[in-house]
Image: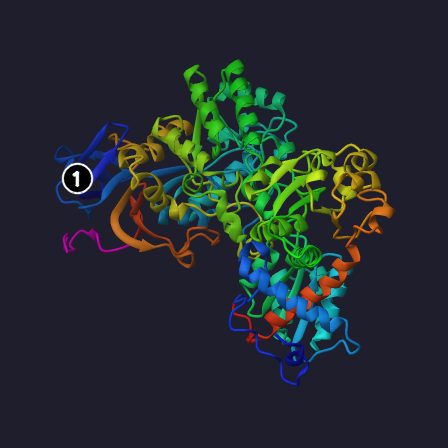
Amino acid sequence: MSIAALTSAEPPKPPASGWSGKHLLGLEDLSREEIHFILDTAESFGEVSSRTRKKVPALQGRIVFNLFFENSTRTRTSFSLAAKRLSADVQDFSASVSSLSKGETFIDTAKNIEAMGADVLVVRHSSPGAPHLLARHVQCGIINAGDGAHEHPTQGLLDLLTIRKAKGRIEGLTVGLVGDISHSRVARSNIWGLTKLGAKVILCGPPTLVPRSLEGLGCEIAYSLDDILPRLDVVNVLRIQSERQQQGLFPSVAEYSRFYGMNQERVSKAPGDLLLLAPGPINRGVELTPEVADGPNSAILEQVKNGLAVRMAVLYLLGGKTDAKPAAD
Amino acid sequence: MRTIQIKGGRIIDPSQGVDEVADLWLGDDRVLGIGEAYAQGTADVVIDARGMIVSPGLIDVHVHLREPGNEEDETIATGAASALAGGVTTVACMPNTIPALDTQGAAEFVVLQAQRARKANVYPVGAVSKGRKGDELAELGQLVAGGAVAFTDDGAPVASASLMRRALLYSKMLDRVIMQHCQVPELTVGGVMNEGAESTRLGLGGMPAAAEDIMVARDIRLAEITGGRLHIQHISTARSVELVREGKKRGIDVTAEACPHHFTLTDERLRTFDSNFKMNPPLRTADDVAAVIEGLKDGTIELLATDHAPHAPEKKMRELDQAPFGIVGLETLIPITVHGLIEPGHLTWVDVIRMLTVAPAKLLGLVDKGTFRPGADADVTIIDTETPWTIDPEKFLSRSRNTPYGGWKVKGRAHVAIVAGEVRHSLGGIVHEAGEAATP
């Protein structure tokens, strides 16, 4: 896809080969080729963001609805900005000020929004599978922007893009995911994406947060970060939610930080070109120290930039396909 | 005396060791007997059952009827009609209603509503504890006086070991069984499905098999020290089956039931995030399914039951972790049992009918049910074993539609159900009043 095509008056046609899906519900559903195709498309859109005029008419006349049933700043903003750069009309929906508080169901809410002409629904929900439920009840395209502890596919894609750009490849790399894997949608999308593209994935954290059953997803399990660091090309540091400590899944934040926090000493044990990712929001001093977060190995802000490009690519690829027919019962 | 002649069917009555092609005679609300010796001249009603199985009316010991309190899901009348459509002529209904069935009056209400409905027989199962709160014993003796045939806090386990011990002891004087939903509650908090590879994959809260195993082990030991009667409801794990097997070998009075969904479906079905696969206990792994089937084959598990758990569509159509647990089961009991147990050769029709007649009658102490012994209640199920059909939830008589089996192409269906000598369900074509042509 050329940038010239993207900036022309008519929306560009997707290449003949690529991604045939109507929704983006998770990376588990995508093939290796489809993932690479989305990443390739995102790289093209990344260039758009570096131009002076950061807008293309690709989705002019299309309506993107951000349906966020769970709090989010980063992801919602990123989707909104991505849609605007594609010239779509964007509407945010917040559950706390909606008819949900009057007892309306999730499905009815989405059907009403679809009836207003939405082409794409970007859905964030605390219940795993909620976007899948919607996909069975509405006609427009659904993008999963995080469903409980299940998947967060655009985060997975932006992590893949960041790794691919920094390392030039994904196949053959060893990637460590550190933290609360059990409750992490980011971890699951990373696991599917990385393993499909040929990386080795090591999951690391205390056994209460990293169950053995994760081996079934094709990953290695480790409880000692110090032991695995010399083997890692990439480490993705996941956020620890204080709720997990309240549930007694680990004794204290201090103890967690001592064993699993990324500090300069640990970075020095890893190969010099270790790439450090963190999906954010980051807890400075807990999962990683400030000097590491801001240090030369960190790609945290690159991830944010790539997130915008990935979301533009996904919105573009889905938004051009929908018929916007009324929802079937 | 008004008589019914059921002609030429394959009569299976495991209570008497009968499996033969013969005529069955009913007189008023009683069984007259099997064979020509019981012929009463010209019958008032002749039913042509050739090519079909004639069984004592099927009994389901585990059914939720939701009335009082959740009549939008089911009522005693609609649940009893659903039972008949599934060939079940007698159900025992669970006490997790609102309010709970924990008093004599509450039990009598169920009996009265069932009489008014005039569909399947309905027997209340009383709560073990007041309000099903797990603190104090309910008035078990008065519940029996009101018609209760057993006790359980189902929907939830009796979590307290001391209360369970007392219930097993106290119920001995009433000769009633304590049924238990075996689950350690602390281990299943936030659980939506079986804990394991699939819950990990889907990011859904898990309910470990050990939560069931530990409670089964505890309760078998309590039954041992008390000499009480323990019945394990909806057994679902391989280790639980083993524990029951061990308990029986040691002479402990323990029985167990299995539900069709636990021997036909695994937790992989949750990959669709469809709430029709959400039940409690949850769908387990293929190894657990195999163990349940093995338990049914070797007699460790003596009963089949549906755990019929209706929920109105607006409740079940919610996000998976917010939707209630449970599926309807009465109208799919026969075909799914055929699909899961008979067609693969795990069990014979005789085995299955034993598990749905004589075994549940014994469990609940229903001496005149589950048998064609002369003088027994004239409850009969006639099963068409051959005609293929497709399960269509929209045609259910249950008020709810929550089934994972919609669209399945199956065999095995209740063609006629007779309760107290009255034909109360019929798909038509084979029942002939006196004066009509008896054969097509």
For residue A92, say whether it is visible. no
Q: Which image quadrant: the C terminus of chain B?
A: bottom left
Q: Is residue B99 magenta?
A: no
Q: Nearer the viewer, residue B386 or A327?
A: A327
Q: Nearer the viewer, residue A98 or A243?
A: A243
Quadrant of the image occupied by residue A232: top right
Q: Is residue B428 magenta?
A: yes
Question: Where residue B205 sits in the image (x, y, percent)?
Answer: 62, 42
Q: Which image quadrant: the N terminus of chain B?
A: top left
Compared with A72, B224 (above or below) is above
Residue shown at the point (68%, 38%) measured from the top left? A209
Quadrant of the image occupied by residue A97: bottom right
Q: Nearer the viewer, residue A89 or B4?
A: A89
For residue B351, say whether it is visible. yes
Q: Residues within 10 Å of mark 1 (few under 14, many from 20)?
A: many
Question: Where residue A166 sits in the image (x, y, percent)?
Answer: 71, 56
Q: How many marks?
A: 1
Quadrant of the image occupied by residue B369: top left
Q: Amino acid at mark 1?
A: Asp
What is the span of residues highlighted in magenta in the rendered image? B427-440
Q: Residue at label 1?
A: B23
Residue shown at the point (20%, 43%) measured from the top left? B6
Circle 1: element type = strand
Lateral position of residue B204 relative to residue A286, left or right? left
Q: For the stretch drawn in magenta, what is the main secondary structure?
A: loop
Question: Where residue B116 sits in the image (x, y, percent)?
Answer: 44, 47
Chain letter of the residue beneath label 1 in the structure image? B
Q: Nearer the viewer, residue B430 or A46?
A: A46
Residue lying at the far bottom in this picture: please name it.
Answer: A9
Chosen colour scheme: rainbow
Question: Where residue A75 sits in the image (x, y, percent)?
Answer: 73, 60
Compared with B325, B220 (above or below) is above
